[in-house]
Amino acid sequence: MPRPKRASPKNLSLTEIQSELKQRQKIVRRLERQRARLAAELEGVNRQIFELTGVHPQGAHRPKNTSNLGDALVKLLRGREMTVSEAAEAVQAAGYATTANNFRTIVNQKLISDKRFRKVRRGVYSTRANAK
């Protein structure tokens, strides 16, 4: 909606400036109420999307997990051997939430860098005997 053209303040009297200021403050209050209503409506829509998908539609909100990725992988791999892809799919199936597009790469990095895991052979990992 285009804003109406306003007169330049230098051509107005003090009374006209005060009147203009009152009008603008009234418009700002109305717009702030409208913004608050729209924000509440948007939050409701976002909540419904999140309930259906488990992913916040604005992407800003990271999912909350009960444990970190390393701990989740230790529980999953204890006594087993898995490829990186299998581990990434299994940890998500077990309830680990992520919005990462490159989750397999993140799992791979964790398996390489975390001392609780050992490489069995190329691309296959398990836990070390003393992994907690």
Image: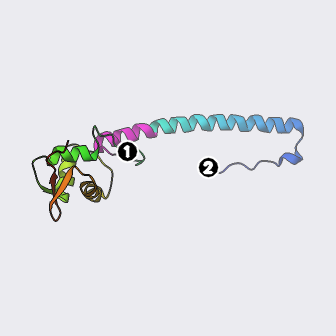
Residue, disc 1: 62
Number of marks drawn = 2
Spatial distance from mark 1 to mark 2, Cα to Cα? Answer: 35 Å
Q: Is residue 44 magenta?
A: yes
Residue beneath the point at 61% across and 38% down: 31
Judged by its main secondary structure, the magenta piece is: helix
Instruction: Identify residue type, mark 1.
Output: Arg
Left or right, 69 with respect to 2, comes to: left
Q: Quadrant of the C terminus?
A: top left
Q: Residues within 10 Å of mark 1 (few under 14, many from 20)?
A: few
Query: Considering only order in the chain, which callout, 2 or 1, is on the residue closer to the N terminus?
Result: 2
Residue 82 is drawn in which quadrant? bottom left
Q: Position of residue 11 (x, y in %)?
A: 88, 47
Q: Which residue is mark 2?
A: 1
Which residue sits furthest front? 130
Q: Is residue 111 above or below residue 38?
A: below
Q: Position of residue 2 (x, y in %)?
A: 65, 51
Instruction: Report crowding for label 2: few under 14, some 14 to 19, many 20 or more residues within 10 A (C-alpha).
Output: few
**Helix, strand or loop for disc 2:** loop
Residue 77 position, x and y percent, is: 15, 49
Residue found farthest to the bottom? 122
Which residue sits at x=52%, y=35%? Answer: 37
| Region in magenta | 42-56
Q: Residue at x 26, y 47 (%)?
A: 70
For residue 107, which quarter of the picture? Answer: bottom left
